[in-house]
Amino acid sequence: MRIAWLSTREINHDLCSTSQLNLANGLADIGHKITVFSPGASSKNNFVHVSLKRSKIKGLQAKSIISELRKILDEINKFEFIILDWQLSQMQSLITKPTLLIDRSPPA
């Protein structure tokens, strides 16, 4: 299955990205074709990473990622399944494929 993961996590920089890396690599290891769209850079993984520009201003970071994702919405909608970080939930109404909303934030 071709899966896109739309994320706010900065790969290889954000402490919480380790669980995302392991999950994406695990899905790839069992035969899924994973593409992660997020800030930062990634290498030596079993998935494709598409780097997104993100504002440095706190409070505008998710909004800036959404703006970047809207530019490539046609490409995103070519995937069979979308994993969507909860911070990007307003993208869900624009996505035409089945979507899983995921919350990897720490518990309150």
Image (cartoon, rainbow, N blue to C red):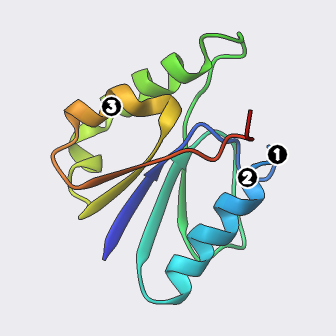
- Whole-angstrom CA distance, mark 1 to mark 2, is 7 Å
Q: Position of residue 13 (x, y in %)?
A: 82, 45
Q: Which residue is mark 1?
A: 13
- Front-lying residue, 53 or 58: 58
Query: Can you tell which of label 1 and label 2 is closer to the viewer?
Result: 2
Q: Amino acid at mark 3?
A: Met
Q: Which residue is mark 2?
A: 17
SS of the residue under disc 3: helix
User: Based on the displayed image, in which of its 4 quarters is residue 24 positioned?
Assistant: bottom right
- Whole-angstrom CA distance, mark 2 to mark 3, is 21 Å
Q: Earlier in the sequence, mark 3 or mark 1?
A: 1
Q: Is residue 92 left or right of 29 when viewed as pictured?
A: left
- Crowd rating for badge 3 (residues with CA inside 10 Å; few <14, some 14–19, many 20+): some
| Numbered tag placed on residue 40 in the rendering | none
Quadrant occupied by the N terminus: bottom left
Do the numbered discs 3 and 1 sit on residues whose CB atoms are within 8 Å?
A: no
SS of the residue under disc 1: loop
- Crowd rating for badge 1 (residues with CA inside 10 Å; few <14, some 14–19, many 20+): few
Q: Is residue 78 left or right of 49 when viewed as pictured?
A: left
- Front-lying residue, 104 or 51: 104
| Numbered tag placed on residue 91 in the rendering | 3
Q: Amino acid at mark 2?
A: Ser
Do the numbered discs 1 and 2 sit on residues whose CB atoms are within 8 Å?
A: yes
In the rendered image of this protein, does residue 55 appear above or below residue 26?
above
SS of the residue under disc 2: helix
In the rendered image of this protein, does residue 63 appear above or below residue 21?
above
Q: Earlier in the sequence, mark 2 or mark 3?
A: 2
